[in-house]
């Protein structure tokens, strides 16, 4: 039975869904989820195609190793033209046959035999079948383990690429929200200019109030332009990963479709990482390949046995007839008795590599545990900060509304109004950044704990 590398079911489902139809315009269907966008991005990403080609190359190496178990058929032909001191058995037999003819008074025995050695031509087809070949057996096992290690590397890169795509979209979403915030702020500062001009006209404020209001409006306009540039840059980064035109409009996905669920417990995240992180499986398969390499080196102490059947013709000229053909079956054995300690040295190298990979696996387990703990702790802090950011934004909004009413009635100074507006903008910006920070932290936790990709709807 053919051995095939199989990934975790979630990754198989994720890879299968990557064959969905390409991204279409939002008007063509109901709004997509972020998971679906990532699936399509993985299907189109050139980096992912390179990763998959590397895995297919390792699959081909396994096919090559498997083929060594099968019989081989070869066609061999030789034609030799010898000169000089060449052995010809005919020169020994012809005189004897001539004497026999004289004794018998006939010509029963040929006296012109040409038995030159080696004979001028030999043409044959050989069918060979390995019977016991330690190198073939271990070579197949090594190729299979290396293929599995390559598959683990492929899936680890798949997770990393999916995390990059999710993070890129979250950056797009954040920059859009910041731009929307400044778009909503522009009417406020424009209204401040109008109110300042009205107060100056009514003699209730000095002209410098108008200049300060206009300066504030220009500052907000500049920040809005910067936010627009940041949004365009984030969209280009996302389009690059999705293999879309760089200046194409990035899709818009509702917050409810981002797939950012509740924060799992630390124990659940650690358990998922230990069970699902491909790097752990990859280093173990590499270690098993090193074990196979050691067995391969030690396998030279055993004989290699194979069967061969030859069918062909030989002679001093080409004659294809039943009397000229021959068939021979051979049992072949090869046994290396001494190789200058080379095999022992190769076995020692493989043994050291096995020990190195075992140590690497232990260190990797600790590293994965560290990554999960760090990512989970950062996500927990970011989640708890959202409530504080919400409270701050709500308080800043109420404060601004109160100060604005007082300013319009002449009960608050322009500096108080500008400060209240600055505090409101800062609080709303902090709310956006805090929320985005939690989402990005969750993406990193999902990658570290191997919680994503998941089975998609």
Image (cartoon, rainbow, N blue to C red):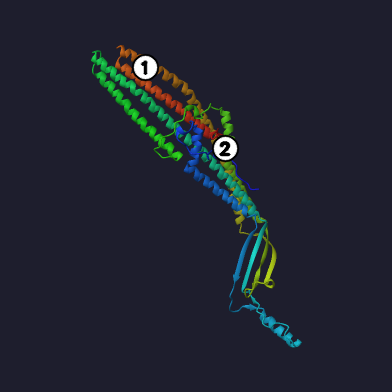
**Any part of residue 310 in sight:** yes
Within 10 Å of the Cα at label 2, are there few (<14), some (14-19), or many (20+) other Cα atoms? some
Q: How many marks?
A: 2
Nearest the viewer among 274 and 43 is 43
Q: Which mark is residue 371?
A: none
Nearest the viewer among 425 and 313 is 313
Q: Position of residue 431 (x, y in %)?
A: 43, 24
Q: Earlier in the sequence, mark 2 or mark 1?
A: 2
Q: Position of residue 404 (x, y in %)?
A: 34, 15
**Any part of residue 363 in sight:** no
Residue at screen point 71% across, 85% down: 98
Which residue reaches farthest right?
104
Question: In the structure shown, which secondary structural element does the residue marked by tag 2 occupy?
Answer: helix
Residue 225 shown left or right of residue 75 in the figure: left
Residue pointed to by mark 1: 400
Residue pointed to by mark 2: 13
Numbered disc in front, either 2 or 1: 2
In the rendered image, which quarter is residue 175 located in? top left
For the residues bearing labels 2 and 1, Cβ distance under 8 angstroms:
no
Q: Position of residue 29 (x, y in %)?
A: 48, 32
Which residue reaches farthest front?
28
Within 10 Å of the Cα at label 1, are there few (<14), some (14-19), or many (20+) other Cα atoms? many
Q: Position of residue 455 (x, y in %)?
A: 56, 34
Quarter of the rendering occupied by the C terminus: top right
Residue 265 shown left or right of residue 133 in the figure: left
Nearest the viewer among 118 and 284 is 118
Residue at screen point 32% across, 28% down: 222
Question: In the structure shown, which secondary structural element does the residue marked by tag 1 occupy?
Answer: helix
Q: Give how far apart the Cα atoms at labels 2 and 1 are.
A: 51 Å
Residue 409 vs 235, above or below: the answer is above
Residue 410 shown left or right of residue 362 in the figure: left
């Amino acid at each position: 039975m053919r051995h095939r590398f199989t990934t975790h079911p979630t990754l198989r489902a994720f890879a299968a869904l990557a064959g969905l139809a390409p991204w279409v315009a939002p008007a063509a269907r109901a709004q997509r989820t972020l998971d679906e966008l990532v699936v399509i991005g993985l299907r189109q990403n050139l980096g992912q195609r390179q990763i998959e080609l590397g895995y297919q190359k390792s699959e081909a190496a396994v096919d090559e190793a498997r083929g060594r178990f099968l019989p081989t058929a070869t066609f061999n032909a030789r034609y030799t033209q010898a000169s000089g001191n060449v052995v010809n058995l005919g020169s020994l037999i012809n005189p004897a046959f001539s004497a026999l003819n004289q004794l018998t008074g006939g010509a029963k025995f040929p006296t012109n035999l040409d038995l030159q050695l080696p004979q001028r031509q030999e043409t044959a087809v050989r069918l060979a079948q390995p019977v016991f070949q330690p190198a073939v057996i271990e070579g197949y096992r090594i190729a299979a383990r290396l293929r599995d290690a390559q598959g683990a590397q492929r899936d680890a890169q798949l997770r990393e690429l999916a995390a990059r795509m999710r993070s890129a979209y979250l950056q797009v979403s954040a920059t859009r929200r910041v731009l929307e915030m400044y778009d909503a702020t522009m009417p406020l500062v424009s209204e401040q200019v109008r109110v300042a001009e009205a107060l100056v006209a009514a003699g209730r404020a000095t002209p410098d109030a108008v200049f300060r209001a206009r300066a504030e409006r220009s500052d907000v306009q500049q920040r809005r332009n910067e936010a627009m540039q940041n949004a365009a840059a984030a969209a280009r980064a996302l389009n690059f990963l999705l293999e879309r035109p760089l200046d194409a409009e990035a899709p818009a996905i509702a917050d409810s479709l981002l797939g950012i669920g509740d924060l799992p417990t630390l124990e659940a995240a650690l358990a998922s990482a230990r069970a699902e992180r491909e790097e752990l499986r990859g280093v173990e398969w590499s270690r098993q390949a090193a074990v196979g390499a050691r067995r391969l080196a030690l396998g030279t102490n055993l004989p290699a046995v194979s069967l061969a059947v030859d069918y062909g013709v030989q002679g001093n000229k080409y004659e294809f007839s039943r009397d000229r053909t021959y068939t021979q079956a051979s049992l072949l054995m090869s046994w290396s008795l001494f190789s200058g300690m080379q095999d022992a040295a190769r076995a020692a190298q493989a043994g050291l590599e096995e020990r190195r990979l075992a140590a690497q696996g232990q260190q990797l387990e600790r590293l994965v545990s560290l990554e999960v703990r760090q990512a989970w702790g950062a996500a927990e802090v970011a989640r708890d900060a959202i409530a504080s950011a919400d409270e701050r934004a709500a308080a800043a909004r109420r404060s601004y509304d109160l100060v604005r009413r007082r300013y319009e009635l002449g009960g608050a100074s322009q500096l108080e109004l500008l400060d209240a507006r600055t505090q409101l903008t800062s609080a709303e910006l902090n709310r956006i950044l805090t929320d985005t920070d939690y989402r990005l932290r969750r993406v990193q936790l999902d990658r570290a704990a191997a919680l994503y990709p998941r089975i998609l709807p």
